[in-house]
Image (tube, coloured by chain):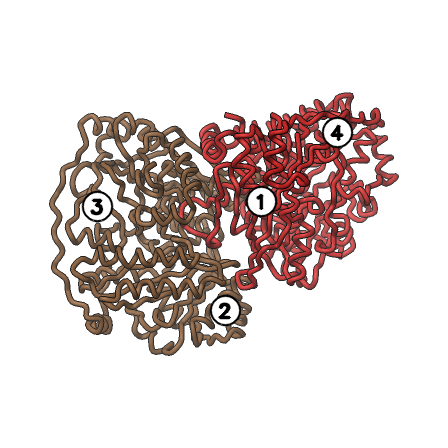
Chain colours: A red, B brown
Amino acid sequence: MTESDLPVAQLTPGRWGDPAHPAELPAAALDALKHLGIQRPPDPVVESEVRSGLTDEQLQFLSSVVGSQHVAAEWEARWAHTRGYSTTDLLRFRAGDTSDVPDAVVYPASHDEVQTILRGAAEHDLAVVPYAGGTSVVGGLAPTRSFVTLDLRRLDQLTDLDEISRTATLQAGVRAPAAEALLAERGYTLGHFPQSYEGASIGGYAAARSSGQSSAGYGRFDQMVVGLTIATPRGTIELGRAPMSAAGPDLRQLFLGSEGAFGIITSVVVRIRPRPTERHFEGWKFDTFEAGLTAVRRLAQDGPLPTVLRLPDEVETAVNLADPDVLGSSAGGVLAIIGFDGPYNQATADVLTAAGGTNLGEGPGETWRVGRYRAPYLRDPLLDEGALVETLETAAFWSRIPALKAAVTDALVGALSATPPLVLCHISHVYETGASLYFTVVCAQTDDPITQWRNAKSAATQAIATAAGTISHHHGIGTDHRDAYVTEIGPLATEALQAVKQTLDPNNIMNPGILLPES
Amino acid sequence: MTESDLPVAQLTPGRWGDPAHPAELPAAALDALKHLGIQRPPDPVVESEVRSGLTDEQLQFLSSVVGSQHVAAEWEARWAHTRGYSTTDLLRFRAGDTSDVPDAVVYPASHDEVQTILRGAAEHDLAVVPYAGGTSVVGGLAPTRSFVTLDLRRLDQLTDLDEISRTATLQAGVRAPAAEALLAERGYTLGHFPQSYEGASIGGYAAARSSGQSSAGYGRFDQMVVGLTIATPRGTIELGRAPMSAAGPDLRQLFLGSEGAFGIITSVVVRIRPRPTERHFEGWKFDTFEAGLTAVRRLAQDGPLPTVLRLPDEVETAVNLADPDVLGSSAGGVLAIIGFDGPYNQATADVLTAAGGTNLGEGPGETWRVGRYRAPYLRDPLLDEGALVETLETAAFWSRIPALKAAVTDALVGALSATPPLVLCHISHVYETGASLYFTVVCAQTDDPITQWRNAKSAATQAIATAAGTISHHHGIGTDHRDAYVTEIGPLATEALQAVKQTLDPNNIMNPGILLPES
């Protein structure tokens, strides 16, 4: 089974992934939770329905654009479009928190319908949140005032495939598995497989500057995009007449990562590649994370890079709650995963061997491949059992990676000292000049886990800033990272972005409070 | 001799390159000019000196920042900083045109001095043009009102080299050969070799989104930059805490290509690579440009790419004024050039052979390598003899390349029908999804060659827009492409950029009229 065979997951509010395939914790994991002193918390609170604040006149406007059958103001649809999937979001669902519920969900079918809604929204006093996959983990769906959500699922077409140029034009609402299936019919792949794959969308990839598990081979999503169509409250912008250009700043890179704050990306032209006819995944053991770090840096700088390259640290290697079987085979070291889309490249293996790696064969590689989208499913039963589980990520230049990793780990351990945490870390995205670091934190919940995590996250954020990392490698800004973002780029660059927003969205209807502080 | 051995050229106003090595036209070329009906024009007009418009108060301000010995208001220095090297610029020198002469040339020594000048410029009614290499070919040094030029040559340091991360921090005024020499001492190379190499600077590379002859192997300059320090009239912006990030838009890409309109890039952090210990250059013959096009597209899409990849069309292959010897060996087809920094890659050669190419060996490759920076030198004696010679470039997706090439050629031939031109074309930069097209035009000058070229360029610009190319692949916007740029990105994106400028440069002192129309 490859990615193009996976169905699109219809996510459940407050629980990750396809409800037809819930995760169960293995017995070993339950034992481990007991050792961490974790106890089941009270049952979740059932939410109380909140009325939509939409006026008849507002409903009338929205219906006039998309048809009344494509405007949903009933509770179920609105609740299903509330928040994303950060642990804080999940905890707020469990607490029955009904703030941030949209006043309606609107389903436009075309760029023109999106454009018409955005042009008229200010006059009708509507703020707008774009929604496709809904998989944000940084508070990306939580504006500060009443709003309607534009669900882009009806923009679900592959509208062009240029086999000479190897580009595909995909509408923003195409979900990731659907995109792969559409491309697979023609023999192509996008090659973008983030952990949110089952729920993610093309528009979300672009708006959030996504990075996938195969980034070593296929690049980041922002490197795949060659064209964008954007609906803004003041009109349409079309960008990308060539792969690269010296015609001024690369404005595509101004909208990639703009998280809906300037407008709604309705269509994306992406570079595609032929589908591989073979794939290989292997486990490689290194004695220490440090030894593995040197090895993956060597591949990133001198090649040849595989398609997938993942290096967990000692703690993450040992604590694999999803698959305790793997643990034994790599005890005492770290278990890297290497994957090739296409023929096996012996030269890559030779670099790893020369750097002290031991090939453990395809077993651990296949175990990782099969379970690659399952890890987030485990968070729900862990939260059910009273564990606090969350992830955060950063990136930096290679020379800063060891100190950054230590600083973030120390900050998390220090902030959570009352409930001693496990802090797991891995590298999963590499560049010639640096890499990402992805942290997973597991500890016992306190009575107020939202505040508990807020304090830990705040300490980690401070550590990232001090140790010269970026606040996010691929999760984005949303509301959670907004203050840290302003600190990272500085007040003047923030003002420049606010000026762009003011130009394109003068009434601040687009995702208010997301990405940028309201000026 | 490699790039790091080349001296920094001190360019002469109105004539390209190192005056110690002027070009002479071979006899065959002089014969060819006669066939085109080309006759020597009148001798150039000697310019009349124009007084600096600077007040004592303005001079005082500038001197107070950099020291009076670093402010030059005398004619020679000002004339030496006038315009760039487009053919129109050269023709205006020959016409004795003294418009666009700066009122003074200022030589700051540090970021802080640049920052202080920019902060104070508005109060002292000074517009500012940044200058380092001065090699613009798109009217990039010609603002619309009186101004001082900030020559960054004293910002000439390699301030950091991080061998773990493989990054180097270079000040903006470091000239390209000096940068290679500084890096070579440590065993590294930047790998960026545009045709302007002898005169270009690090800051200019960044501000103009440069692309070099080795782009297939090393990438474009904008892909090498991981960090930027920018002085703006409102303060300093520092960008780039990681190779890549999902922390909002990639703001580095907003300043790369901004051509000094938002501020002055004072320092750049670039990715570096180990110096190659061997290099190989070869000529490959294809029967037609079309056959060569398929071959280079195959390398761009499926690899393995060489470091240098150039494909001239039939006309450019036949008309090699610099080296008539090469002509014979490739008569009747096209002569592609392939280069490797590092070991020869037989797999690349195999792709070319399979695509119908014939290996002509290292002779033509070495001829190209040795003469790679000499072509622009020929323009001066050609202009002396009465030829009109100019280049223009574009880029597009692969499927549009043949129609775009035909459309631009037709437009140039049509607009210059009174002086039938030769139109040469080559591809020198390739991407998975498309490529650049670089045109050279040669014909007889009319009595008014500036207007003659303006009309031809206008026709080519219209053809590029209609055939879905970008107005510039690597020359940039300057003033020459400003209107076409607005057409290309649209009025709303233009307004967004003007809002950025208004935020960072509220008094419009930075390179006024460059890149963006004055709002």
Location of mark 1 (residue): A206
The kind of secondary structure element at disc 1 is: helix
Q: Image quadrant for the N terminus of chain A?
A: bottom right
Residue B23 in picture, x, y percent from top left: 24, 62
Q: Earlier in the sequence, mark 1 or mark 4?
A: 4
Judge the density around disc 3: few (<14), some (14-19), many (≥20) Cα neighbours within 10 Å. Answer: some
Badge 1 amino acid: Ala
Provide the chain ID for the residue under circle 3: B
Badge 2 amino acid: Thr
The kind of secondary structure element at disc 2 is: helix
What is the spatial separation of the Cα atoms under label 1 and label 2, in whole angstroms? 31 Å
Q: Is residue B62 left or right of residue B307?
A: left
The foreground one among A509 and B409 is A509
Closer to the observer: label 4 or label 3? 4
Q: Is residue B296 left or right of residue B487?
A: right
Provide the chain ID for the residue under circle 2: B
Quadrant assignment, res B71: top left
Q: Earlier in the sequence, mark 3 or mark 2?
A: 3
Badge 3 amino acid: Ala
Judge the density around disc 2: few (<14), some (14-19), many (≥20) Cα neighbours within 10 Å. Answer: some
Location of mark 3 (residue): B80
What is the spatial separation of the Cα atoms under label 3 and label 2, in whole angstroms? 45 Å
Q: Is residue A377 visible?
A: yes
Residue A156 badge: none
Location of mark 2 (residue): B294
Closer to the observer: label 1 or label 2? 1
